[in-house]
Image: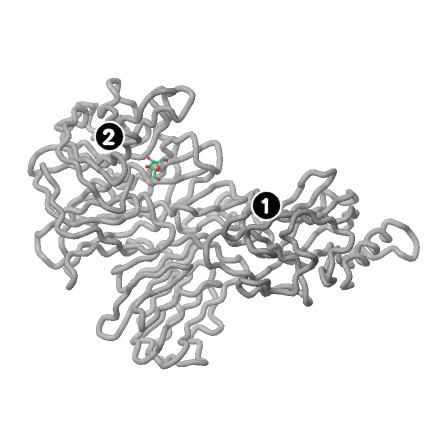
Amino acid sequence: MRNFALALAIVAACAVPAGARRSADDKIVIADFEQETYGDWKVTGTAFGPGPAAGTLAGQMPVSGFQGKRLVNTYFGADATVGTLTSPPFTIQRRYINFLLGGGMNLEQTYIALLVDGKAVRKATGPNDRAGGSEALDWATWDVQDLMGKTAQIQIVDSATGGWGHINIDQIEMGPERYAEAIVVSKLYAETYRPQFHFTPAKGWTNDPNGLVYYKGEYHLFFQHNPFGTQWGNMTWGHAVSKDLVHWTQLANAIEPDALGTIFSGSAVVDEGNTAGFQKGGEKTIVAIYTAAGDTSPESKGVPFTQCIAYSTDRGRTFTKYSANPVVKHIIGGNRDPKVVWHAPSGKWVMALYLDGEIYALFGSPDLKNWTELQRITVPGCSECPDFFEAPIEGKDGATKWVLTGANGHYMVGDFGGEKFTPETGVQQVDFGGNYYAVQSYSDVPPSDGRRIQIAWMAGSEFAGMPFNQQMSLPCTLTLKETPDGLRLYRYPVREVAKLRGPAKVVRNRVLKPGVDLLAGVTGELVDIELTVELRDASDVVLEVRGEKVRYDAAAKAVTCLGKTAPLAAVDGKITLRVLVDRGSLEVFGNDGAMSMTSFYRPRPANKKLGLTVSSGSARVVSVRVCPMQSAWPKQP
Ligand code: FRU
């Protein structure tokens, strides 16, 4: 049945008994969009053009995955055009409605809906929300068992005008089978798009990691949290702990909004010397230093942003707000995100605080309660969430430098004697992915361990349809290395991540040339891939992971992935790449952390294909190791 008008006629016929009755096993095509006009579907606006498009439209990336010769493609007149397309009423007679879907991801503005009594009872949107992406269509399925026998309409809406402001639809059918994989949302931590080895809260929104502190065998991860919804708001410090930075247990929320404001980002320290005097008994106090974001809630109307402290005498299980808060009064604008470190040589606490524009300030305090400004410093290209820490220089026994980072992880290396930070590098960048933000490193990691461990918010990780939203990056070790360009930060996943690896598939010492795929037939859902390759005269090396390509361009000396590019020079003719893929991320580490790319990526659940190829010339793969990763979450009953 290729004609949609005719298909609808048959649907209507199904309602009448006798000869026209069809078996419930048959599929019924609601529309195949093979005609030059939309027939009896009602069109408004101009986005839908005069009729179904004959494939790709002018200026569009190639459209694929549709059936026959035509499809609905609202790129007519490019992204700026808007409109709707609505089917005549039909009766729902099969358990599933399957259709091919592609284009922009925007559930509010660019979607296909199933209407019953004029109300949307199901909605779906394409997979793309950023530059790049793909115009390919793929099956989507609605389970409509509960709507059986109802009169419904299909409505396709394009009211978005910016990037990816269009939708592609084809071949709408009713049938007894689902073509797309079922999306699980009900089983906590087993949801279809739940990251399996990245931290997400059970429910609700998260953004910045906060209060990263180690105490008595536990890494605490406080986080910006909206406990009441999957979008930003009601900022509260959520709380999770881990013994190994891999398996997390979420605890009760730690710090909640009050009359001074909602609780914005900040840090935490162990007050070893009881400088604040909060300690009771033998347990050291954990002191949290946070921003009270005044005027962000009805209770704090008209109150400015200030810095406050709260303390815990029970290993972080409960926090008491200091009665004389705030400890730093309002200075300017939205001043926020205090990060505190103990400076042993001068015997004081040092706070890095974001002020405004690209300006930060350092403060000093003997007791976490009384703060004096030490310095103002501009960090070009940076704002929000400072971190300030001392790090050893690798291979230089005992030598250290200080590092100041902004929310985007850009950093300067320099000296700090207790009063003034003097940068000796310009602003540097270590991560080139699209979703690396609000970075913070752990306080109080024991000297016997000695690592500087950083977590970033993978900002922009939109898990539409899931009970949670956004996620944290992998915890990574930061190291300072001497390079020909000066001191640089390296960033690499903490070694504990490897605990989740299953048995590896390893290929060694093989020549890679056009036509050869060294990972042909290898699949994986959650994977940790390590690749060392001698480039020889290969133009590129392409690691395909579940529908996305991580491509090293030998001439450009750079890796591209998900529309981003990161520089990576070969060392002795070789490069190494480590690529970790979870249900919502793709992280790339080049040459043991010389650069990283932290990106949100939601592979299609069904696509588990891996590949390793070159386009021209040949390379020698020293080794490629593909490890399946286990979930870090306990199995739910
Ligand atoms: C960074 C940020 C911080 C602020 C917090 C609010 O992502 O904007 O500056 O404290 O998020 O949630």
Q: Amino acid at mark 2?
A: Val
Q: Nearer the viewer, mark 2 or mark 1?
A: 1
Please give left or right for residue 406 compared with residue 263 in the image: left
Q: Nearer the viewer, residue 44 or 618?
A: 44
Q: Distance between the Cα atoms at labels 2 and 1?
A: 49 Å
Q: Are marks 2 and 1 in contact (CB under 8 Å)?
A: no
- Horizontal placement of 193 versus 423: left or right? right
Residue 287 numbered tag? 2
Q: Quadrant of ligand 1?
A: top left
Residue at x-position 30% and y-position 26% = 305
The location of residue 483, given as percent across then percent down, is 16, 62
Which residue is located at x 51 percent, y 40 percent?
467
Q: Are there few (<14), some (14-19), or many (20+) residues within 10 Å of tag 1?
A: many
Nearest the eye: 314 or 300 = 300
**Type of residue at label 1?**
Ser
Q: Quadrant of residue 271?
A: top left
Q: Residue 612 at x, y = what percent?
A: 41, 72
Judge by depth and name the residue closer to the eye, 100 or 523.
100
Label 1: which secondary element: loop
Say whether mark 2 is within 8 Å of ligand 1. no
| Dot label at residue 159 | 1
* Vertical comparison of 409 with 501: above or below: above
Q: Position of residue 122 (x, y in %)?
A: 65, 44
Upstream in sequence: badge 2 or badge 1: 1
Whether residue 303 appears in this view of the structure is yes
Callout 1: CB less than 8 Å from ligand 1: no
| 465 relative to 313 in the view: left or right | right
Q: Secondary structure at mark 2?
A: strand
